[in-house]
Amino acid sequence: MLLVGLVLLLALTLAGPVRQFLAGRAELTRLAAEGTALDQRIADLQTQLERQADPAYTTRQARERLTYVLPGDRLVVVVDGEAVEGDAGTVPEPAPAQLPWYEALLHSVAVADGEPGR
């Protein structure tokens, strides 16, 4: 009976440290996996940095994201289902200025009255 009691006492005494040892090993495994993931992230960011240092990549991104075009290129933009074309080397002519409705009314009255110069 005394021997069984000593074995139980020894098992209870060692249970805490064994549990802490196993928890520490699990934490080390988790930290190692996190370190590997961070190393992969570093490699991905380094690759992205090298790619962004390339002028051709920068030009391509400016054309895609900002819709930049070089002079002489044709730009086609689809707005509300309709294709709108433009030339990158030319500036579109401004639309004629529209008069406010009240000035247009006064102008049409003046023209109807026979004063086209006004």
Image (tube, rainbow, N blue to C red):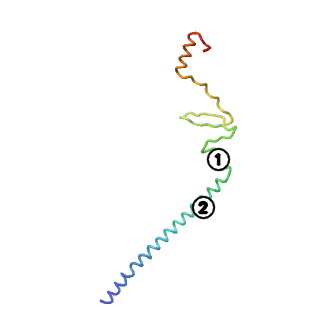
Residue 27, horizontal then vertical, whole percent: 47, 70
Q: Is the residue 75 above or below the residue 1 in the image?
A: above
Name the residue at 56% across, 60% down: 41
Name the residue at 69% across, 38% down: 71
Residue 51, horizontal then vertical, whole percent: 64, 54
Q: Nearer the viewer, residue 82 or 105?
A: 105
Q: Which residue is mark 2?
A: 43
Q: Nearer the viewer, residue 102 or 78?
A: 102
Q: Is the residue 81 above or below the residue 118 in the image?
A: below
Screen quadrant of the C terminus: top right
Splitting the image into 4 quarters, where does residue 10 fall?
bottom left
Which of the labelled discs sits on residue 99, or is there none?
none
Q: Nearer the viewer, residue 108 or 90?
A: 108
Splitting the image into 4 quarters, where does residue 75 fall?
top right
What kind of element bears circle 1? helix
Question: Which amino acid type is shown beneath numbered disc 1?
Answer: Arg
Name the residue at 46% across, 73% down: 24
Question: Which amino acid type is shown beneath numbered disc 2?
Answer: Ala
Residue count near mark 1 (Cα–Cα under 10 Å), binned few <14, some 14–19, many ≥20: few
Residue 29, horizontal then vertical, whole percent: 49, 70
Which of the labelled discs sits on residue 60, or is there none?
1
